[in-house]
Image: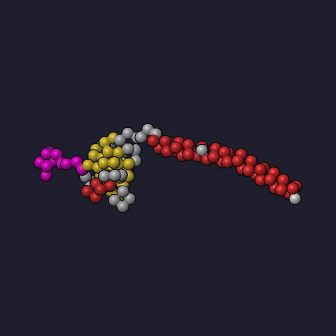
Amino acid sequence: MKKTVLALAVAVAMAATASAQTAPKAAATKAPAPKAANQAKAAPMAPAAKAKATKAEVVSTDPAAKTITVKDSSGSNMTLTATGAAVAELAKVKAGDMVTVTHTDTNATKIVKVKATASKKAKK
């Protein structure tokens, strides 16, 4: 009976030692994961595309898809996805309107309808 109790005590001690040794490894493997997540969060904050304003003629709008296609002064068409306040402005402009679009490469952040100048009013 003493041998059984001794064997049981040794087995429990071995299990406790093995368990204690694996716990820090588990914690160590979990630690890099948040660092990787932090690096992933930092990546989108890379240099943002600089917004620029372009005066252009509206070719078409699609409020459902939140897109606007405009033709700039060089005659090239550009389709932009409206974001923020520009989404509400899509309903206010139509094909043929002159607008100033503040945009990055693919996103329109501001759309302002250009008012007719005095010379255009005089021609009408």
Q: Position of residue 9 (x, y in %)?
A: 80, 53
Q: Is residue 62 left or right of residue 124?
A: right
Q: Position of residue 124 (x, y in %)?
A: 13, 52
The colour scheme used here is: secondary structure
53 and 58: which one is in front? 53
Question: In percent of the image, x 38 and y 59: which residue is there?
Answer: 65
User: How many numbered badges does the structure rendering display?
Assistant: 0
When the figure is inspected, residue 45 is found, relative to residue 9, above or below; the finding is above
- Dividing the picture into quadrants, the one containing residue 48 is top left
Q: Is residue 30 visible?
A: yes
- Furthest residue toward front: 2
Q: Position of residue 21 (x, y in %)?
A: 71, 45
Q: Is residue 96 left or right of residue 50?
A: left
Q: Is residue 27 left or right of residue 21?
A: left
Q: Position of residue 76 (x, y in %)?
A: 36, 46
Q: Is residue 117 magenta?
A: yes
Q: Is residue 94 visible?
A: no
67 and 11: which one is in front? 11
Q: Is residue 21 left or right of residue 65?
A: right
79 and 83: which one is in front? 83
- Furthest residue toward bottom: 64
Question: In percent of the image, x 13 and y 45: which residue is there?
Answer: 118
The N terminus, quarter of image: bottom right
78 and 123: which one is in front? 78
Question: In percent of the image, x 24 and y 50: which residue is there?
Answer: 113
What are the residue bounds of the magenta stretch?
A: 113-124
Question: In percent of the image, x 66 and y 45: which residue is there?
Answer: 24
